[in-house]
Amino acid sequence: MALTRAEVEKVALLARLELEPQELELLTAQLARVVEYVDQLAQLDTQGVEPLAHAVELTNVFRPDQVQPSLPRQKALQQAPRTDGEFFRVPAVLEP
Amino acid sequence: MSEHRYELVVGLEVHVQLLTQTKLFCGCRNQFGAPPNTLTCPVCLGLPGTLPVMNQQAFQLALKAAVALNCEIAPVTKWDRKNYFYPDLPKGYQISQYDLPFSRNGYLEISDPRGRFGPKRVGIIRVHLEEDAGKSLHDETAGQADSRIDLNRAGTPLLEIVTRPDIRSPEEAKAFLTELKLLLTYLEVSDCNMQEGSLRVDANVNLHIHTPEGTVATPIVEVKNMNSFRAVERALAYEAQRQYHQWLSTGHRLGQVPKQTRGWDDQAQITRPQRQKEESSDYRYFPDPDLVPVTVSPEQIEQVRQSLGELPATIRERIQKQYGITPYDADVIVSQGRAVVEYFEKVAQVSGNGKQAANWVQRDVLRTLKERQWTMEQFPLSAEQLGQFVARIAQGRLASSRAREVFDHMLRTQQDVDTAIEALGIQTVDEDTLQELCRRLVEANPKVVQQVRQGKTKALGALVGQAKRENPNVDPRRVQEICRQLIEQAEA
Ligand SMILES: [Zn+2]
C-alpha cells in the first residue's frame, strides 16, 4: 500500500506536528515502509476468524466503586508548565 | 415569496453523568462543585504508565439505563480511543465506544398529556459508556489571554444516548428530554441536573420541504450550547425558520455543503456558526489496549430487568386506572418522582377518593413543597393524616370552604384532622339544621327568590352571606345548592 505525501501531511496535522519539507519527505518514505510491513497481515486468510478486540484473552476486569484518595492539588499541578496554584493555565483556546 | 409546507426532522445526542461514587477508571470521587483540581490522580491526569480499570457500578448503571430504554445489549463490548487535542483532555484521547457500543436499537415512548401530539416511539440508535473531559474556563474578565483548566470532571462516567431522527417538533424534543430525565432519575442512574451539566443535549436538525417537484431535504446542522429544555425548544424553532429561509435564498440541499455546527445564543435567541466538525475518521479511533472487553450474559440482562422496578410510563397508566384520575393528574404526580407517587397512593387509599386525593396532593402539597423547598420526605403531614383529611371532605363532613384553613392548621401543628377541626372551632352543621336554615332564609327573602326565578342566580349570594353570618360553620356551596333547590321546588 503506497502512502502519499498528502496523507502524511494530514496525519501530521492531526497529531499537531509541524514538519519541514525534508522531514515530510523522509517520514513519508519511512512511514510507507512501516505500513508495508504491517500490510503483510493482509496476505492471511481470515475468513471465518472472529475479530479480536484485545491481545490478552481476558474479559470483565472491574474495580469496585470505592473512593480512593486523590492527589493533593499542589502535587497534581506540579508537572504543569503553567499554573496559578488552583488551575492549569494554558494558551487561550476557542470555545469548542 | 412562495410558502412551502415543511417538516422539522430532529435527532438528539444526550450526555448524562452517572451517579457513581467514583470516576470511570480511577478511585477519584465523582463529585460536582469541589475546589478545582482537588479530585485528580495519575490515572485521570493521563500521566504515563498508569492503567485505567473499569468501575463496575458505572457499567451496571449504564446497563440499567439501556435495558429501560428497550435496547439490545451486546454480548461483547469494548472501549476505543477517540483521539483529539484539547487542553481539558489530558491524555490526548477520550476513552469511548466506537463500533461495538454495549447497547443499540432501543426506543422511548413519549406522549403529551395535553394532547398536542399523539403518543409515539422515539428510536434510540445507541447508548454507550465513555469518560467525560475536564472543564475549560475562559477568563476574559481578568484581561488574561489564557484559559484555566479544572480536571475534577476528567474521567467521570458519561452515558451517550443517540436518538434516531424521529423527532418532528420542538414540543416533541422537550417531551423526549423530560421523559428521559424522569426515567433516569427514577432509576437513580443520573440526577440529570442541567445547571450542573449532568445532562447535556446536542441536536441534529434539518427540514424536509415539500415542493411541487417533490420533497427536498436541507443540509443537517448540529446545534449545541442549549442549556435548558426551554432553550432546546426555542433553538429548534429558530433553526427551522432559519433553515427554511436559507434554503429559499441558496437552494442548498443535503449533501451539497459540509455539515455545519451552530451554537445557541440564549441572550440573542439565535444560533451562530461554530467551528466545523472534524470528520469521524479524523478521530482515528482504535481499540484501547489498556482495557479488556466486557461480556454480558442473558441472565445478567434479566437480572437488571428485574431490578428496574415500576417505571414512570407504567405507573402513569396504573394510577389513572386504579384511582380514576385524569392522564394530566397522573402525569403531574409521576413527574414529581417516586416519593410523591407513593404519598399520593397512600392518600388515595386512606381517603377512598382518588380524584380528591390527586387534587390536594397536586395543588396544596406540591405547592407547599415548592414554596418551602422541601422534599416529599420533609413534608410534615403523613399520607395517613392527609388521607383522613381528604376523606372528611369527600364524605361531606368538612366544608370545602374551610378545608384550606384546616390544611394550613394541620401543616403548622401536625395535628390530625379531627383535632384541627376542633381547635379551629369548626362544627359540622348537620343536614337537618342546614335545610331548616335555608328554608327560613328563602321565606324571609322574597325579593331574592324573585330575582333567582328571573334567572339571576347570582342573587343567591345574598342568601349565602346571611347564612354565613348566622352560622360560620355552614358550607357555602351546600347553602347555595339547597336554596336553589328550594326555590325551584316552590316554583314547580
Ligand atoms: Zn483519578
Image (spheres, rainbow, N blue to C red):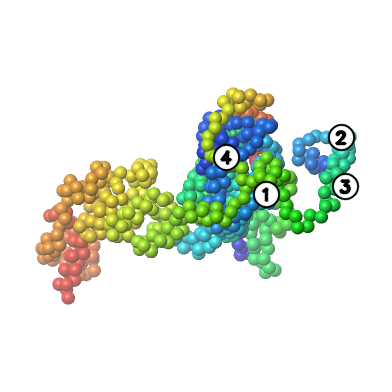
Q: Is residue B223 left or right of residue B229?
A: right
Q: What chain letter is assigned to the residue under label 2?
A: A
Q: Which residue is mark 4?
A: A63
Q: Are marks 2 and 1 on the same chain?
A: no
Callout 3, which amino acid? Ala
Callout 1, which amino acid? Tyr
Q: Decide which of B434, A54 is in the foreground and name it.
A: A54
Q: Are marks 3 and 1 on the same chain?
A: no
Callout 4, which amino acid? Arg
Q: Is B276 drawn above or below residue B438 in the view shown?
A: above
Q: Residue at x 72, y 54 (%)?
A: A50
Q: Position of residue B475 (x, y in %)?
A: 20, 57
Q: Mark 2: is the Cβ under 8 angstroms from ligand 1?
A: no
- Quarter of the picture containing the C terminus of chain B is bottom left
Circles 2, 1 touching at the beta carbon (< 8 Å): no
Q: Is residue B218 left or right of residue B106?
A: right
Q: Position of residue B89 (x, y in %)?
A: 65, 37
Q: Residue at x 14, y 59 (%)?
A: B430
* Foreground tag (4 vs 2): 4
Q: Which residue is mark 3?
A: A2
* Foreground tag (1 vs 4): 4
Q: Decide which of B164, B116 is in the foreground and name it.
A: B164
Q: Which residue is mark 1?
A: B98
Q: Of the two numbered discs 4 and 3 on the same chain, state the one appearing first in sequence.
A: 3
